[in-house]
Amino acid sequence: MAATGTILVVDDDPAICVVVGEALRRQGHKVKTAASIRERSALMDSFVPDILITDVMLPDGDGLDGVADIIADRPDLNVIILSAQNTLNTAIRATEKGAFEYLPKPFDLNELTRAVSDALGTRQGSEEPEGEPGLPHDGLPLVGRSPAMQEVYRTIARVLSNDLSILVLGESGTGKELVAEAIHSLGQRRTKPFIAINMAAIPRELIEAELFGYEKGAFTGAHARTAGKFEQAQGGTLFLDEIGDMPMEAQTRLLRVLQSGEVTTVGGSKPVRVNVRIIAATNKDLPLLIEDGRFRQDLYYRLNVVPIALPALRERREDVILLARHFMERAALEGLPRKTLADDAAQLLMAYHWPGNVRELQNLMQRLSVLSRENVITAEILRHMLPLDAVPADYAAPADQLAHAVREWARRQLGIGLAQPNRALHDDLLAVVEPILLQEALASVDGNQIRAAGLLGINRNTLRKKLTDYGLDPMQLRLND
Ligand SMILES: Nc1ncnc2c1ncn2[C@@H]1O[C@H](COP(=O)(O)OP(=O)(O)OP(=O)(O)O)[C@@H](O)[C@H]1O
Ligand SMILES: [Mg+2]
C-alpha cells in the first residue's frame, strides 16, 4: 500500500488543478489547489502539505521564487515543479531551488503520480542540495524541447553539484561534446579547466603520453617533462572523447588512475594526485566492444555511473525547426543576411532523416545563410542542398499538404480581394472543401455509402445527412470519371 499525504497543487490553469487534483485524490491523498503565488502563500499559512506541486509561470510571478525559502522553512516538504518552459535553464533552476522533481509540461499523469509516491517515500531524512546562486544561466547552449531532451536536461541538472562520472552516448553530431561542456561550465568546477582529449584523433602509441604526461627522455622526441591531460585538468573536468577508440593497454592504465586517483607519467616513477571529474563520450556500442574483447568491462562500469543518451535528431523531429531557427539567428548575429523558413521548407527539414544529426543541420543552415540569395528559404532551395534520394517524395503529411494548398489559395484570393466580395474565403471554405472530399470518397468506392463512410471514418447517417445538405446525389457520383 503506497503512502498517502497532503498535497498543494498550484497552477493558474484550472484544468490542470482539476485533473491533477482528481488523480491524486483518487489515490487517497488530501489535495488543495491554488491559482497564484498569493493564494499559495495564504493556503500554506494554514494547510501543511507534504508535497507542493507548483507551476513556474503564475499570474503574479515566478513560481520558483520563494521555493528555496519554503524549503528552508520546511525541510521535509518536497516540491515538484511543473513547467512549460522546457529548457535546460528551468531544469537547473528547479534543481537548485531544492525541488525534488521537475516535470516538463505537457506531463504524463502517471509520471506525476510516480513522482508523488517517490516524494512521499523519501520524506524522511531529506538532504536538500544547497541552492547555489549566481550560476551563469544565460546563453545556455542546448536547444530543444522534445521529451527526450527534457530527460537529458534533468540528468544534467542533477549532476552539476556532484562529481559522478558521466558517459555521454549518441550518434555522431548529436551534441555529446556540447553536453560535456555544459556540465562543466554550469557545474561546481566551472572556474577550473575543461580539458578534452579525443582518442580517435591521436596516434595510438601517443595516447598514454598525452593522457598521463611523460618525462624527459621517456621516448624519442621527449625533450622535456610534459604534463598530461589529467594534470592539466587538475580540479576541473577531463573529457575523454571517442572513448570506444581507446587502445586496450591505455584502458588498463586509465582504470588504474581512476581507481587510485594518482597519475604517473610515462617514464616517471613519482605519482601525482589528481582531482578531475571524468566525462567520457562515444558513438560506439560499448557492451558490444566488451563482448568482442575490445573494451574493458571494469572500465565501462567505472565510466558509466551516470549515462546520458542523446537522441538522434530524427527521433526528435519536433526540435528540428527550433534548431534551424537557432542556427539562422546565430548566423544573423554574426552579420550574415537574416533568413526565414517557408512552410514547405520547414516540412522538408522535419521529414529529412539527418544522418549527421544536429551538426548536419547546423552546417546546412550556415551554408544557406552564406550562399542563398533568397531571404526566404523554400523547399525548392533546400532540395538542391539536401541529398534528394534521402528525402521522401511525400514528405508532407496529407493534412499539411491541404493546409499548404489552402494557404496558397487564400493568399491568392486575398491578393485580388478588393475586386470582389470574398465570403467564400471565410464562411464557405468548408462548404467547398467538404463536398469534394465526399464526392471523391464515394467515387472511389463506386457510390457505396457504407464503404465511403468507412473511408472517411464517419458513420453512415452522418454521411447521408451531409450528402443531403450539400445536395449531392450518390447515384450520380458513381458515374463520375
Ligand atoms: N541541442 C543542441 N543545440 C544547439 N546546438 C547543438 C545541439 N546539439 C549539437 N549542437 C551543435 O552541433 C554540433 C555538433 O555537436 P557535438 O560536436 O557536440 O556533437 P558530438 O555528438 O560530439 O559529435 P561527434 O560524435 O561527431 O563528435 C556542434 O556545433 C554543436 O554546437
Ligand atoms: Mg564529439
Image: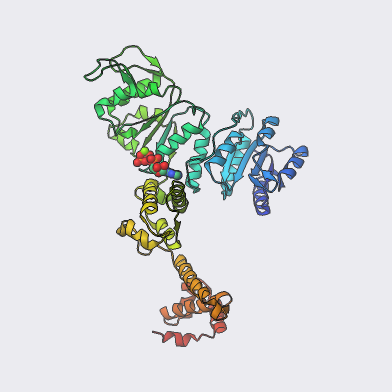
Q: Position of residue 274 (x, y in %)?
A: 41, 19
Residue 92 figure quarter: top right
Callout count? 0
Q: Position of residue 116 (x, y in %)?
A: 62, 41
Q: Nearer the viewer, residue 79 or 198?
A: 198
Identify the image's colour scheme: rainbow, by chain, secondary structure or one colour.
Answer: rainbow
In the rendered view of the protein, which quadrant contains the C terminus? bottom left
Q: Position of residue 395 (x, y in %)?
A: 39, 62
Residue 28 in view, yes or no: no
Q: Residue furthest top?
A: 270
In the rendered view of the protein, which quadrant contains the N terminus? top right
Q: Position of residue 453 (x, y in %)?
A: 49, 75
Residue found 64% across the figure and 29% down from its top: 124
Q: Nearer the viewer, residue 44 or 118?
A: 44
Residue found 46% across the figure and 57% down from its top: 340
Q: Residue furthest left?
A: 220
Q: Is residue 226 above or below residue 292?
A: above
Q: Is residue 316 left or right of residue 38?
A: left
Residue 238 figure quarter: top left
Residue 173 in view, yes or no: yes
